[in-house]
């Protein structure tokens, strides 16, 4: 009976890893895919490799944290309870992936484990409070940093990068399947700066994928590892393989949502979002906080779009090549051009908000990113508190 339950537990852990691949590939490589730097297949391949590197190097430390610190007594993790926790996590993540919304695997997993600890009377509330505090702060920081960049610095960054605002007809890097093995092909670029910008946004995406591996692998394997039935290294490899399957399959929906539906990201914007999100996520991971980079990345996208939409360029901006707005208001008197030093009011139309981020999609993303962890937390609590088979 225990062998059968262990087998079920492993299958459920693989299911969780599959859904982690679907949830985390979008935030990591959505900006690059949305800017048509790489295709979805290339994004999935990079996600698989970088996630596995993070899982195998720093991942074990996070596994020990989730399996040890959040609950005061690790004996709560039995084969039965661990399998149930993983099933709740996987089912909740699948709900978000099914509707194409990347949800926070860290919030979902911690919520389910915390519900188990609460039902068993072994939850360490101080550890949970610290984690939740940073979950609230990090998305706000990402939104406002991106908003400030979008409102005040984005045109200068775009001019400095010298990257085209328009989207490409096809990805800059794509995979050609002709021949025995697939091979990457780099399309023609407008210059070295565009190529360097593309390399930057992909490199930052790889960094985010690596950071995801360091923290999110624990969400798939920590409950099962805590039972003491399996060694950690095989679990890390199995979990990483499941994430790769999710990246190549169900992640296409979340890549579409973060890369195209929320906002039509040009390459400079993709770089800004990736840098801000990865900096916040890596900083939190360095101090041992399971980072919810799905929400950080999403709110950075929204913040950048809102900042750009709320910006009102002036004629001096236009003279420096920053944006190309339609000038409104009188510039002359009686048809005569005044000098640049005249007291003429300098106003210009800001970009329309709807052209930079989709409010309805954004609302749907924000709602689902909170609903899915709530479903996992409440579902796990009901399971362990009221169902006789799992009750503590």
Image: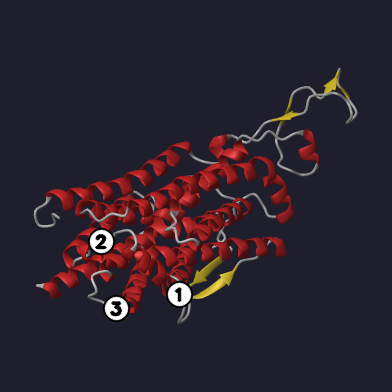
Q: Which mark is residue 337?
A: none
Q: Which mark is residue 57?
A: 1
Residue 121 visible to the viewer: yes
* Badge 2 element: helix
Residue closer to the observer: 147 or 31: 147
* Badge 3 element: loop
Identify the residue shown where x is 79% and y is 43%: 320
Mark nearer the N terminus (2 vs 3) = 2
Identify the residue shown where x is 22% and y is 52%: 380
- As displayed, is residue 179 above or below residue 371? below
Identify the residue shown where x is 60% and y is 56%: 271
Residue 39 visible to the viewer: no
Label 2 to label 3: alpha-carbon separation: 17 Å
Residue 100 location (% of width, % of height): 37, 50
The mark lying in front, picked from 2 and 3, is 3
Quarter the C terminus occupies: bottom left
Q: Which mark is residue 231?
A: 3
Residue 174 location (% of width, % of height): 53, 67
Drawn side of residue 112 relative to residue 147, left or right: left
Quarter the N terminus occupies: bottom left
Q: Which residue is mark 2?
A: 86
Mark nearer the N terminus (1 vs 3) = 1
Residue closer to the observer: 373 or 65: 65
| Crowding near the residue tagged with mark 2, few <14, some 14–19, many ≥20 C-alpha atoms within 10 Å | many
Label 1 to label 2: alpha-carbon separation: 23 Å
Residue 211 location (% of width, % of height): 48, 64
Drawn side of residue 338 relative to residue 217, left or right: right
| Crowding near the residue tagged with mark 1, few <14, some 14–19, many ≥20 C-alpha atoms within 10 Å | few
Mark nearer the N terminus (1 vs 2) = 1
């Amino acid at each position: 009976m225990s062998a059968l339950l262990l087998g079920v537990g492993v299958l459920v852990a693989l299911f969780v890893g599959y859904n982690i691949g679907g949830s985390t590939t979008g935030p990591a490589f959505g900006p690059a895919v949305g800017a048509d730097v790489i295709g979805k297949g290339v994004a999935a391949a990079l996600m698989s490799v970088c996630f596995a590197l993070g899982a195998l190097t720093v991942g074990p430390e996070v596994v020990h944290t989730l399996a040890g610190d959040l609950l005061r007594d690790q004996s709560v993790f039995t084969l039965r309870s661990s399998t149930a926790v993983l099933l709740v996590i996987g089912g909740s993540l699948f709900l978000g992936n099914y509707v194409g919304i990347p949800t926070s695997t860290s919030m979902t997993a911690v919520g389910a484990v915390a519900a188990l600890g609460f039902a068993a009377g072994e939850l360490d509330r101080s550890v949970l409070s610290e984690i939740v505090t940073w979950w609230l702060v990090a998305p706000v920081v990402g939104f406002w940093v991106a908003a400030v960049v979008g409102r005040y610095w984005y045109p200068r960054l775009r001019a400095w990068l010298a990257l085209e605002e328009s989207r490409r007809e096809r990805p800059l890097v794509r995979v050609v399947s002709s021949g025995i093995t697939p091979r990457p092909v780099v399309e023609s670029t407008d210059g070295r700066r565009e190529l360097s910008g593309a390399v930057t946004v992909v490199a930052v995406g790889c960094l985010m994928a690596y950071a995801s591996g360091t923290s999110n692998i624990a969400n798939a394997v920590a409950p099962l590892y805590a039972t003491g039935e399996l060694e950690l290294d095989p679990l890390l490899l199995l979990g990483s393989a499941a994430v790769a399957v999710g990246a190549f399959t169900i992640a296409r929906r979340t890549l579409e949502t973060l890369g195209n539906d929320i906002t039509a990201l040009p390459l400079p914007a993709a770089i800004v979002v990736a840098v801000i999100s990865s900096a916040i996520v890596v900083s939190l991971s360095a101090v041992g906080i399971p980072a919810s980079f799905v929400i950080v990345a999403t709110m950075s996208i929204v913040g950048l779009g809102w900042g750009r939409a709320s910006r009102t360029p002036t004629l001096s901006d236009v003279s420096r090549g920053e944006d190309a707005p339609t000038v409104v208001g009188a510039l002359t008197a009686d048809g005569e051009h005044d000098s640049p030093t005249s007291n003429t009011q300098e106003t210009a139309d800001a970009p329309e908000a709807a052209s930079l981020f989709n409010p309805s999609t954004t609302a749907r993303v924000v709602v689902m990113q909170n609903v899915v962890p709530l479903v996992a937390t409440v579902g796990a609590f009901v399971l362990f508190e009221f169902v006789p088979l799992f009750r503590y």
